[in-house]
Image (cartoon, grey):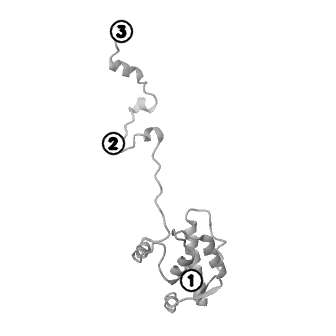
Amino acid sequence: MSARKPKAASVAQDVQPATGLEAEYGPRVLPASANPLEAEYGPEQQKPAKRSVVQAKYKARYRALGNYRGCGDWLHQTLEAETVDGFGKLDLPRFEAICDENGVDLGKYNRTSNGWQGRLRMTGRILLRGKIRKSGAILIDGERVEAPREWLAAQS
């Protein structure tokens, strides 16, 4: 019958002698809160915090009005009815067609970075608002839609 090696002897054979920093300072000890895989694979990559150009106070105001996408005024409701599909997604070609029809050129704005669609929608709306303030109406498919007097007065 062969003699078994004691467990301690087996473990001792698998341990490699310390080299480099471990020989000088001892074994690397991770804090209890550290991810045990960080020692082998490096620190865990964190997702960047969401950033928005819309301040939190305005987001809260929009939510209170029941609409997360905008302020809920006449222009917002008109554009939403014309350019947002049944799934809440912006029909960008339709929005650009309305902007072009009213003399707003969106061709020079960035279309490569994350969130460009939302920024284009907001910028187009601001530019449309200026055109409507001057003319008193918005053109949609060749039809002139008059802006309410209250809305025009609030834009001054």
- Which amino acid type is shown beneath numbered disc 2? Ala
Residue for point 62% across, 65% down: 111
Pointer 1 with pointer 2, Cβ within 8 A: no
**Lower sequence index among marks 3 and 1:** 3
- The residue singled out by tag 1 in the image is 129
- The mark lying in front, picked from 1 and 2, is 1
- The residue singled out by tag 2 in the image is 32
**Lower sequence index among marks 2 and 3:** 3
- The mark lying in front, picked from 3 and 1, is 3
Q: Kindly tell me whether residue 3 is visible in this rendering.
A: yes
Quick one: which residue is furthest to the bottom in this view? 149
Q: Secondary structure at mark 1?
A: helix
x then y, percent, for residue 127: 59, 80
- The mark lying in front, picked from 2 and 3, is 3
**Lower sequence index among marks 1 and 2:** 2
- Which amino acid type is shown beneath numbered disc 1? Arg
Residue 153 or residue 68, whichever sits in front? 68
